[in-house]
Image (cartoon, rainbow, N blue to C red):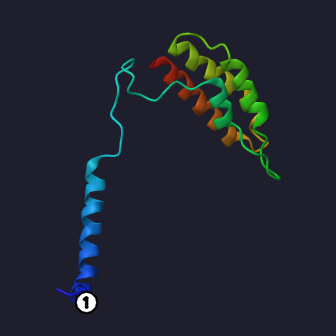
Amino acid sequence: MSPRSLFPRCPALVLSLATVLMAVALFSGCGGRMAAPGDGGGAPAMSVKEFYEFCSSLPTPGACLSDPICGRYRTELSSPPPDLPGCLSLCRQTQSALYVANLTNGCGPTLDRAADLCDQFCRRRASR
């Protein structure tokens, strides 16, 4: 069989190979498993430094400055309560304390992101 006789079949071969690979990727399950607390299968604990890096954003003209919000959370999380309910309560209290000041300055989304990250910080810490 010469290489030229294989050429007409190549597009069909490539298409069927691509279809098989997509099916394998789809059904192989890229998602992680649900882990019980303490079994080491969940997300790793988040450090205060990582929290601040995830929270902070580069300032752009007319945008919110994230540093005052993220810095306040960083200060609070540097010595969080040892239990999950206490840590989550700290997140809510910090969000409430910052809410009014950031209501009209366009920093609401930044405050929401910081509060979500604070929750993640507490939950990931408690799962260890």
Residue at the image point whose x is 63% and y is 30% from the top: 51
Q: How many other residues sit within 10 Å of disc 1, few (<14), some (14-19) or many (≥20)?
A: few
Residue at far top of view: 82
Q: Using the rendered image of the protein, determine whether residue 10 is visible from the camera's viewpoint.
A: yes
Q: Position of residue 68 (x, y in %)?
A: 79, 32
Q: Using the rendered image of the protein, determine whether residue 97 is visible from the camera's viewpoint.
A: no
- 50 left or right of 62? left
Callout 1, which amino acid?
A: Arg
In which quarter of the view is residue 13 placed?
Answer: bottom left
Q: Position of residue 121 (x, y in %)?
A: 56, 25
In which quarter of the view is residue 93 placed?
Answer: top right
**Who is closer to the viewer here, 39 or 64?**
39
Q: Position of residue 15 (x, y in %)?
A: 28, 74
Quadrant of image for the N terminus: bottom left
Tag 1, which secondary structure?
Answer: helix
Residue at far bottom of view: 4
Read off the residue under disc 1.
4
Residue at the image point whose x is 74% and y is 32% from the top: 69
- 98 left or right of 62? left
In which quarter of the view is residue 9 placed?
Answer: bottom left
**Who is closer to the viewer here, 115 or 123?**
123
Q: Position of residue 25 (x, y in %)?
A: 30, 55
Is 112 placed above or below 4 here? above
**Who is closer to the viewer here, 106 or 81?**
81
Is 29 placed above or below 69 here? below
- 43 left or right of 101? left
